[in-house]
Amino acid sequence: MSQHHVVVGAGPVGRHVAALLAGRGEHVTVITRSGRDTGLEAVGHVALDASDADALTRATEGASVLYNCANPGNYTQWEQTWPPLAASLLAAAERTGAVYAITGNLYPYGPVDGPMHPGLPDAATDHKGVLRAKLWGDALAAHDAGRVRAVEVRASDYVGPGIGGNGHITRVLPAALRGKAVSMIGRTDLPHTFTDVLDVARTLVAAAEDESTHGRTWMVPSNAPRSQEQALTEMLASAGKPPVTVRRLPAGMLRALGIVSPMMREIAQMGYQWTAPYVIDDTESRTRFGIEPTPWDEVCRRTIAGLDA
């Protein structure tokens, strides 16, 4: 007998979660503010402001899992958009008894020495990292109090289809495919973990279903780290294209641009991700869930093919 799954968000992760679940015959509803169609067969679509806890609760009644795959579009407005949205999701999960499965990121850790793993404290000092840490902290407190069953999976920078300008590699990939020189943030020669959105979805679904994994965070299994330039060059090679010139945007330039551009100011605050190695240790997740990352050559092909998704 199929179960009902509610997915909030129709970005790359939300679409992959919905596709995985629908592919095995589950009843899936995707919720977005616009009700936009994901193009997935046998998936329902509902137009709903997910920050309305009462409306979201009604839509989640009877669901076994509520997946938080939301990604507020305006990077500069997180303090305004995330708290009411996360509070609504948490309230809906608590009221309905649905497992609350959260798509997280690495921001809560802040700058670190060495690979990131779930045993590290959430010690960020920048405002976006502090915010994301608090959102998980609220869910964890509710879990520990027995009010909800919550789990969060954390991934590094996304690759794969449908990411567009929101990904560090996909942002420059269209120009690079045309043979143009591109600019990338910070050091382009340092090891950096990139995570396929399909693997995020696979891990999120597995964590939601395994009650013994709830009440903590897990890393998404990801391929071996690559520098920005290496990742871009390998993406190009998968499309039969030669390498291009890669210019560096130093942190100082980002801070200067931030004087007039709120978006550049936000990106500059996260510049530590590109001035030192930024890698994850996913050993525990691979062992617990039996998930290996999508092979890198396939990731490259999927990313190229999905540029217009």
Image (cartoon, rainbow, N blue to C red):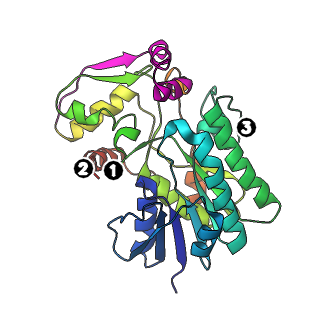
- Mark 1 vs mark 3: in front: 1
**Whole-number angstrom distance, CA of label 1 to CA of label 3:** 31 Å
- Mark 1 packing: few (<14 Cα in 10 Å), some, or many (20+)? many
15 part of magenta stretch: no
As displayed, is residue 180 above or below residue 45?
A: above
The spot of residue 265 in percent (x, y) is 51, 24
Q: Examine the image and state in which quarter residue 247 appears.
A: top left
User: Residue drawn 27% across and 47% down?
Assistant: 301
User: Residue drawn 49% across and 53% down?
Assistant: 200
**Disc 1 designates what residue?**
161
Residue sitting nearer the eye, 240 or 36: 36
**Disc 3 designates what residue?**
121
Look at the image and tell me whether residue 191 can be seen.
no
**Mark 3 element type:** loop
First of labels 1, 2 by sequence position: 1
The spot of residue 118 in percent (x, y) is 66, 44
Q: Which residues are magenta?
A: 241-269
Q: Are marks 1 and 2 in contact (CB under 8 Å)?
A: yes
First of labels 3, 2 by sequence position: 3
Q: Is residue 187 left or right of residue 4?
A: left
249 part of magenta stretch: yes
Look at the image and tell me whether residue 81 can be seen.
yes
Q: Is residue 151 left or right of residue 48?
A: right
**Whole-number angstrom distance, CA of label 3 to CA of label 2:** 37 Å
Residue sitting nearer the eye, 282 or 16: 16
Instruction: Give the residue furthest to the right.
Output: 145
* Amino acid type, mark 3: Pro
The spot of residue 208 in percent (x, y) is 60, 65
**Numbered badge on residue 305:** 2
